[in-house]
Image (cartoon, rainbow, N blue to C red):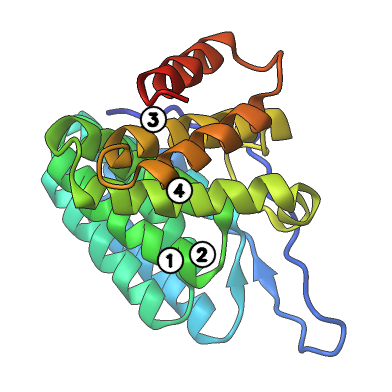
Amino acid sequence: MKIKLNKENIINPIKTNAKSKKVKVQKLFFDEKEIKNSKNAFDLFEKKVTKIVSNNNDVDANSFSGELKCFLNKYTDSNETNKMNNKFVAFAERLVSLGKDSLAGIIYSFLIKANSNNPALVERFAINGLAIAKRFNDPVHIMARCENLRRIYSVAEPQSEKLLKVLYEEKRALNDISKNYQKVQNRFQTVTSEMKPIENYQIMLSAIKIQITKIIKKSNPNEAIKELKEAKVLLGKDKNGELLQEIEKLLSEMSI
């Protein structure tokens, strides 16, 4: 999957504690033609980034993302996706070892998009990305990685404990976003998008609660009913008619 290079991506500035040592953020300058033509371009890129972070400095995530996109497109054009996956994963693991989990998280996001037609790889990369998001206590990216896993398990393992575990993880993240929207928004950092309006996350949370209900309604009907009632409150009267109808149908089936 080829990803279009967008040079206008925006990242929120890194916030530092006034008492802590200021970290120098270095922007990466690159030549797209050089990346396409050099066999050793990625190795040089990796060395450049590693040198910066080894000196206790930080890398501008926007330019880091831009270079990754160029490399991804280069490998895709050359039908070398497997080579790209191996190089990207090895680099991500090295960044984690150097304490730069946020950069590793960016790499895993690219890998998930680039391998969207390979559920086994998406699962592997999403699990790694989820671990990073949890270390950062980043509910937006926890939700995103859970969503990657949910889509896989909903098809491959519906009604499974594995799916249910992911649903509860996503529910906690969405609940955090819904209850602490402003705080989450203030520390949200990404190179590709901004947070959606709070109503979007409330609708998503309701949908997750409905899916949880469908799995636990026989084994734990009281909890299932509680999930449905909470989902109904989140939706109110105007947010999503189809979900409200589904809630009413499930409540009716459970004789409530």
What is the number of the mark on residue 3?
A: 3
Mark 4 → mark 2, Cα distance in angstroms: 20 Å
Asked whether, in this view, residue 102 is left or right of residue 94, the answer is right
- Which residue is at the front of the view, 234 or 56? 234
Residue 113: % across, % down:
33, 36
* Mark found first going from the N terminus, 4 or 2: 2
Q: Earlier in the sequence, mark 4 or mark 3?
A: 3
CA separation, marks 3 and 1?
23 Å
Q: Which mark is residue 132?
A: 1
Visible residue check, residue 99: yes
Tag shown at residue 170: 4
Q: Position of residue 234 (x, y in %)?
A: 66, 32
Secondary structure beneath disc 3?
loop
Identify the residue shown where x is 71% and y is 15%: 237
Residue 79 seen: no
Kind of residue sitting beneath label 1 = Ile
Residue on which disc 2 sits: 102
Task: Say which element carries label 2.
Answer: helix
Q: Is residue 153 left or right of residue 133?
A: left
Of the numbered discs 3 and 1, the one sitting upstream in the chain is: 3
Would residue 42 appear left or right of 53 to someone viewing this image?
left
Mark 2, mark 3: which one is toward the viewer?
2
Place residue 184 in its image quadrant.
Answer: bottom right
Rounded to the nearest angstrom, the CA distance separating label 2 from label 3 is 20 Å
Mark whose residue sits in front, 3 or 1? 1
Q: Are marks 4 and 3 in contact (CB under 8 Å)?
A: no
